[in-house]
Image: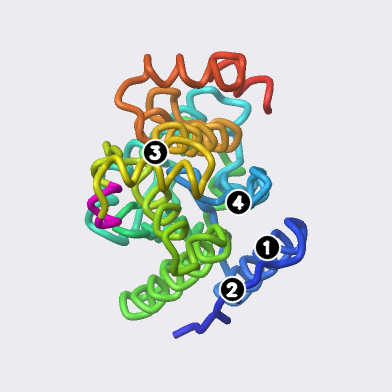
Amino acid sequence: MIRFTPIPRKRPASTRELRRDVECRLKSFELEMNLILTIHDRVGLLVCTDGSVLLRRDRMFHRHPFCEHGRFRNAQWNRQCNAHCTVAVGERIVGGAFVHRCWKGGAEVVVPIVHDGLHALTFFAGVRRGEATEDPLAERDGTLRLIRKGLLPLPSLPARRQFVERMEALGKWLLEAVAPIAITVDSREGRIWRFLHANATKPVGLPDLARDLGLTPGHASREVVRLLGAPFQQLLRELRLSRAAMLLRTHDYPVGEVAHLVGFESEYHFNRAFSRRYGEAPGRWRHEAR
């Protein structure tokens, strides 16, 4: 099993160094395993301390020539790819790692990375040769058939199990790399930050934090303001909105799906909160941010 060097308590000196360290490890993993790794950050955890996105944007999309071929010239192909990567995969992910066979005839090992009981990241490791496509247009595409013929077969079942273990270790390391400093500190401030980051996507309130801290809601409220400088609900909303902004910049999830992933009860309330925070509706902000 692969062993990653634990992240030191002291952060790298700069965001650039952190990004360089992460990208170096991801590339090493890809070279060793002979694959291309795509990472979907489902709730916006992979953010640097300055609020910028940790990963390169192309790492969050399927960039293998097999996946990219025809996708951005054919709107229907692009819709089918999005449906497979979000809807189809999302419906199966609750059962743990599995092999996803896409409509083009490729196959990937899909591994959910769980953090504090939350499905935080999805790793797509591929692309390998799958079953023949049933799409007539894709089947007639000579270039796609040629690329598919050159794909490696899926590894055996025992090899896939080890494969999954190594990706889970990599995912854990990646989440630890961006954990806020306060989360690693055994203090009341650290416990509050830990609670916020672990529960931002859930319907939680100040009473839940108070129970976690062993305080009354009133005492917990005063402690949050004293230690973190803002009320609990404001901190929770800002965290959700910053994660939403990251998802809008880097993923093609519908706005309603983004709202759900970061913890808002409805798309309407999300749109209002996002517009107040960023000055524009989420859809328009996404277009301009890209």
Q: Residues within 10 Å of mark 2 (few under 14, many from 20)?
A: few
Identify which amino acid the numbered label 4 is placed on.
His
Marks 1 and 4, the one that precedes in the sequence: 1
Marks 1 and 3, the one that precedes in the sequence: 1
Res 82 visible: yes
Percent from the top left, x then y, of residue 259? 40, 28
| Cα distance between the residues tagged 2 and 1 | 20 Å
Asked whether the beta carbons under mark 1 and mark 4 sit within 8 Å of each other, the answer is no
| Cα distance between the residues tagged 2 and 3 | 35 Å
Q: Residue drawn at (30%, 26%), measured in percent from left and top?
A: 265
Query: Compared to 151, does 76 lie above or below?
Result: above
| Cα distance between the residues tagged 1 and 4 | 17 Å
| Cα distance between the residues tagged 3 and 4 | 18 Å
- Observer-side mark, 1 or 4, equals 1
Q: Residue drawn at (58%, 74%), measured in percent from left and top?
A: 7
Q: Which residue is mark 2?
A: 9
Asked whether the beta carbons under mark 3 and mark 4 sit within 8 Å of each other, the answer is no
Magenta span main SS: helix
Give the extent of the magenta segment. 209-214
Identify which amino acid the numbered label 3 is placed on.
Thr
Q: Pick whichever, 215 or 25, lies toward us.
A: 215
Q: Which residue is mark 1?
A: 23
- Observer-side mark, 1 or 3, equals 1
| Cα distance between the residues tagged 1 and 3 | 24 Å
Marks 2 and 3, the one that precedes in the sequence: 2
Label 3 residue SS: helix
Q: Which residue is mark 4?
A: 64
Q: Residues within 10 Å of mark 3 (few under 14, many from 20)?
A: some
Q: Residue drawn at (42%, 74%), measured in percent from left and top?
A: 163
Q: Pick whichever, 284 or 203, lies toward us.
A: 203
